[in-house]
Image (spheres, grey):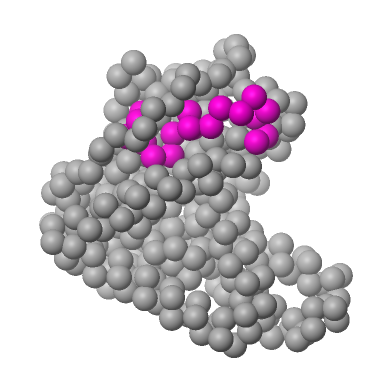
Amino acid sequence: MRLRYAADIRTLFFVALYFGTLAFLWVATPEHWANVDWRWWAPAFVVLLVTSFQGAVSTHNAVHCPIFKSRPMNKLWQVVLTLTYGHPVSSYVPGHNLSHHKHTQSRRDVMRTTKLRFRWHLLNLLFFFLRCVPSIMKADSSYAKAMRTRHPRWFRQLVIEGVALWVVQIALFVLDWQKALVLWIVPHLYAQWGIVTMNLLQHDGCDETTEYDHSRNFVGKVVNWFTFNNGFHTIHHMKPGLHWSLTPEAHAELVAPHIHPELDQKSLVKYLFVTFVLNRRVRPDGTPYFPPPDGPDEEWLPRPEETADDLGAEGLPGEELAAQVAHAPQPR
C-alpha cells in the first residue's frame, strides 16, 4: 500500500473522515427525526457534505493520476471512492477525461458552459448540473458499451464499482430508508452537483482557443488545501497527469507569467458573490459575456488505444499511469 506521493496522506485522511462521519451520524441519529439535537447534528452533516465533495475531487484526481504504486490497490481505491460520492469512478473517464479535457468548450464537451443561457447567472449555477446530466449519462452509456469489447478490463472495473455501489446502497435502504435518503443520497447528490458545476466557475467566459486563457484559477491557499489544489485549473488542463501536489509550483512557473490576471482569482467567495449574486457574467477583460445559442452534442468517442493515459487504474498495459496530455486550443 505504497503511495506515489506522500501528499495523498491528506486524501486518505479526508476519505476516512467521510466514512467515519457517515457511520457516526447513522448510529447517533435517533429513529424519530423529531428527537434530533440539531446543535451537533447539523455541523456533523456539513462535515459529511464537505467530505463527500472531497471524495468527488479525489475521484477526479485518481482518474488522472492514480495514487498508489500498485495497480490492484488503485483498482480497490476506485471502489472506495465510488462509495464516497455515489457514482462509479471509472465512469468519470468518458465525460471528463475524454470529452471535457480533449474538447474543452466545444460541442464535443458534454459539460461546456454554453449549455445554459439564463440572464440571471445564479440560475446557471443552480441548474448547470441538471442540464449536463443527460449528456453525461449518454456519454457514460456509449463509452461503456464500446469498451465492453474494446477494453474488457476497464469495463470489468466499471462493473465492479457499480455493483459495490448498489449493494451498499440497497443494504442501507433496507436498514433504514430515511437515514439512507438523508445521509447517503443527499451528500452524494451535493458532491456530484459540486464537481460538475465547478466547470462553470473554471471555464465560463474564458477563451478555449488560446494556450493559457482557457481556464479560470482560484489560487487561495485555504480553498486549495481542502480541495487538493483543484483551483489550479489551467496547469491541470495543460498537464492532466501532473499530481495535484505539484500544481501550485507548475502554475507559478508555466502559467502565471502568461495568463490574463483576471483568470487568477484570489478569493473564491468574492468571485461567487460578484459573479452570481451581483449577476456579472463577464469575460476576463470585463466585457459582458453571453454565449451564443448552443447546438447539440457532437460525437467524440475515441478508441482506447488513442487515450490509454486517461483510463484511471485500468489504463492499457505498458502505459505510464501519470502520463501528461497537453491542452490543445480549440478552433475558433
**Residue 148 sits in which quadrant?**
bottom left
Quarter placement of the N terminus = bottom left
In the displayed structure, would residue 133 be above or below residue 286? below
For the point 65% across and 29% down, the residue is 121
Q: Nearer the viewer, residue 251 or 209?
A: 209
From the viewer's perspective, tell me whether residue 111 is left or right of residue 223.
Answer: left
Q: Nearer the viewer, residue 142 or 322?
A: 142
Q: Nearer the viewer, residue 33 or 271?
A: 33
In the displayed structure, would residue 156 be above or below residue 139? below
Locate residue 262, reporting x and y percent: 58, 21
Locate residue 33, reporting x and y percent: 80, 78
From the viewer's perspective, tell me whether residue 318 is left or right of residue 58.
Answer: left
Quarter placement of the C terminus = top left
For the image, the number of numbered tags is 0
Is 77 within the magenta? no
**Residue 247 sits in which quadrant?**
top left
For the point 77% across and 65% down, the residue is 43
For the point 67% across and 34% down, the residue is 122
Locate residue 137, reporting x and y percent: 39, 52
Locate residue 156, reporting x and y percent: 24, 70
Residue 65 visible from this viewpoint: no
For the point 47% across and 43% down, the residue is 132
Is 121 within the magenta? yes
In the displayed structure, would residue 83 be above or below residue 244? below
From the viewer's perspective, tell me whether residue 108 is left or right of residue 115.
Answer: left
Dominant SS in magenta: loop
Residue 59 visible from this viewpoint: yes
Task: Tell me the magenta residue range.
Answer: 106-123
